Image: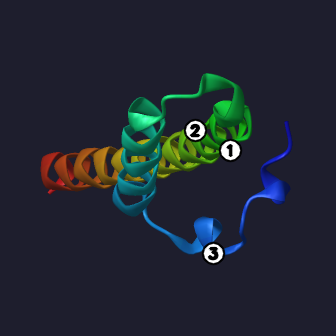
Amino acid sequence: MKDKNLPNDYNSLSLEELTGVANKMVEDLESQKDLESSIEKYQKLIKLNNIIEKKFQKNVKTINEKTKENIAKIISKKNEKRIK
């Protein structure tokens, strides 16, 4: 399933906002009596979940990169102090 079938504004939302949208979708689905009519909603929820996963993975990657940079700076500063 392609994420591009969902509204573009989902791409501009934060993980917290996307999670809120997903939770609302789940609540709506849980209140449905007729599961047959819910198929499209389930498909949209799956697509939204994919967007959330991709954003989460991107954020994890960014955090890892920043952490590595910070560790490298700390090590560099420690090495400078040893040399002096």
Q: How many marks?
A: 3
What residue sits right under mark 1 in the picture?
44
What residue sits right under mark 2 in the picture?
49
Lateral position of residue 73 relative to residue 52, left or right:
left
Q: Nearer the viewer's eye, disc 3 or disc 1?
A: 1
Residue drawn at x 63%, y 75% is 9
Q: How far apart, in angstroms, are the residues tagged by discs 1 and 2?
A: 9 Å
Residue 21's spot in the image, x, y percent? 44, 56
What residue sits right under mark 3 in the picture?
9
Secondary element type, mark 1: helix
Secondary element type, mark 3: helix
Amino acid type, residue under disc 1 in the picture: Lys
Q: Is 63 above or below relative to 14?
A: above
Quadrant in which the N terminus is drawn? top right
Extreme-top residue of the structure: 35
Of labels 1 and 2, earlier in sequence is 1
Q: How far apart, in angstroms, are the residues tagged by discs 3 and 1?
A: 14 Å
Residue drawn at x 48%, y 48% is 65
Q: Nearer the viewer, residue 52 or 64?
A: 52
Q: How far apart, in angstroms, are the residues tagged by discs 3 and 2?
A: 15 Å
Lateral position of residue 53 relative to residue 77, left or right:
right
Secondary element type, mark 2: helix
Q: Residues within 10 Å of mark 2 (few under 14, many from 20)?
A: some
Amino acid type, residue under disc 3 in the picture: Asp
Image mark for residue 32: none
Residue drawn at x 49%, y 29% is 33
Amino acid type, residue under disc 2 in the picture: Asn
Q: Label 2 near label 3: C-beta < 8 Å?
A: no
Residue 19's spot in the image, x, y percent? 39, 49
Lateral position of residue 73 relative to residue 44, left or right:
left
Quadrant in which the C terminus is drawn? bottom left
